[in-house]
Amino acid sequence: MRTLTGIQPSGALHLGNYFGAIKQMLDLQKSDELFLFIPNLHALTSLKDSAKLRENTIEAAITLLSLGVDPDKTIFWVQSDVKEVTELYWYLSPYTPMGLLERAHSYKDKIAKGISASHALFSYPVLMAADILLYSADRVPVGKDQIQHVEITRDIAVKFNNEHGDIFTLPEFKVDENVATVPGIDGAKMSKSYGNAIDIFLSEKELKSRIGKIVTDSTPVEEPKNPHTCNVYALAKLFLDEKGALDLAARYERGGEGHGHFKAYLKELVWDYFAPHRDRKAYFDEHRSDVYEILREGAYKAREIALPMMEKIRDAVGIYK
Ligand code: ADP
Ligand code: TRP
């Protein structure tokens, strides 16, 4: 099973990204042939600051490598290092009806959020289709907001295949229904755009202060508390096994402990959980040339698959040789 996905280089990752997406992706490394890339070309649709895009791209690579992406198991690269993907984007465009793109929710949502309506934003799903089809991915793990883009990819592939024969594999999307929404410090969905996130790689002091800001109810210390309505408990549970969660719930229900205790416990859980990853991050921060080398090798492996596919596609559409 060839599984492919992209993670946007959009700044620091938070606990919602980790438990909602990255952890499942790391699990897939054990069972699937995983292709993972950083879609920096897609990021151009919303980020105009060149220094920031360059920095975010390498930061995203460092974060993913630190969290456990294993370049010996997974083909891991930066989208723009395989330039054929932009060529394919054009070959797919004649097979992309305007209506298909006009119906894209993500495009409408982004405009509603104030991102300016450019051609790149409109044709974003065609570049995403090129990402998926170039590598003949069978399966694409995505968040719910990206399902439609995988469906658009299938529509484009069917139209192209109808004209030129069975060139493209039709991908399936994979959405993990078991993944709960991780709450932010205000109890709403954790998101970097809501300013309520707890980032994965904070200093100990920043982490303590961020967790200190989690909204809790005002039940007095000595009284029993309901863990199931508590944001601190919801976050702590992510780090605990079943017994650990039951034990913590019992502490809530017993009374006698204030939210300060539970927050201190949560801080320890987060801090300890990411300790090995923090060490790896410190290493990569110091040895950026290793990261560039890993990305170069990843791009090389990705191109080995992309180049023969591109030959087939050029041939199919009639590019002269
Ligand atoms: P953000 O909302 O911070 O911009 P993204 O939209 O970039 O996050 O999300 C990247 C991935 O992380 C997606 O697969 C998304 O489903 C997942 N994700 C983001 N926030 C959460 C959350 N609070 N709970 C669960 N998953 C999340
Ligand atoms: N659009 C995806 C997102 O915003 C990122 C992405 C780009 C992607 N190309 C992809 C995801 C190909 C899966 C497959 O999250």
Image: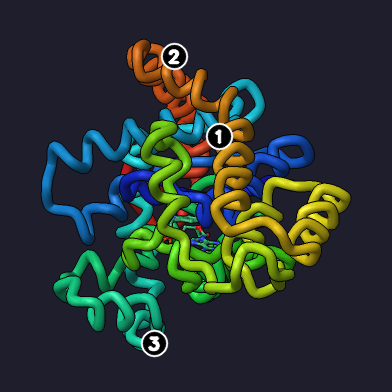
Residue in the picture at 37% in, 11% down? 287
Q: Nearer the viewer, mark 3 or mark 1?
A: 1
Above or below, comparing residue 272 to residue 139 in the picture:
above
**How far is mark 3 from mark 1, CA to CA?**
43 Å
| Mark 3 vs 2, N-terminal side | 3
Where is residue 196, by image quadrant? bottom left
Note whether residue 116 is visible.
Answer: yes
**How far is mark 3 from mark 2, CA to CA?**
45 Å
Give yes or no for contact between labels 1 and 2 (Cβ–Cβ under 8 Å).
no
Above or below, comparing residue 112 to residue 53 in the picture:
below
Residue 36's mark? none
Quadrant holding the C terminus: top left
Q: Relative to residue 90, is residue 313 drawn left or right?
A: right
Label 3 secondary element:
loop
Residue count near mark 2 (Cα–Cα under 10 Å), binned few <14, some 14–19, many ≥20? some
Q: Give the image quadrant in which the ligand numbered 2 is located.
A: bottom left
- The residue singled out by tag 3 in the image is 103
Residue in the picture at 62% in, 21% down? 72
Kind of residue at badge 1:
Trp
Nearest the viewer among 301 and 188 is: 188
Kind of residue at badge 3:
Arg
Above or below, comparing residue 275 to residue 5 in the picture:
above
Residue count near mark 1 (Cα–Cα under 10 Å), binned few <14, some 14–19, many ≥20? some
Residue 283's mark? 2
- The residue singled out by tag 1 in the image is 271
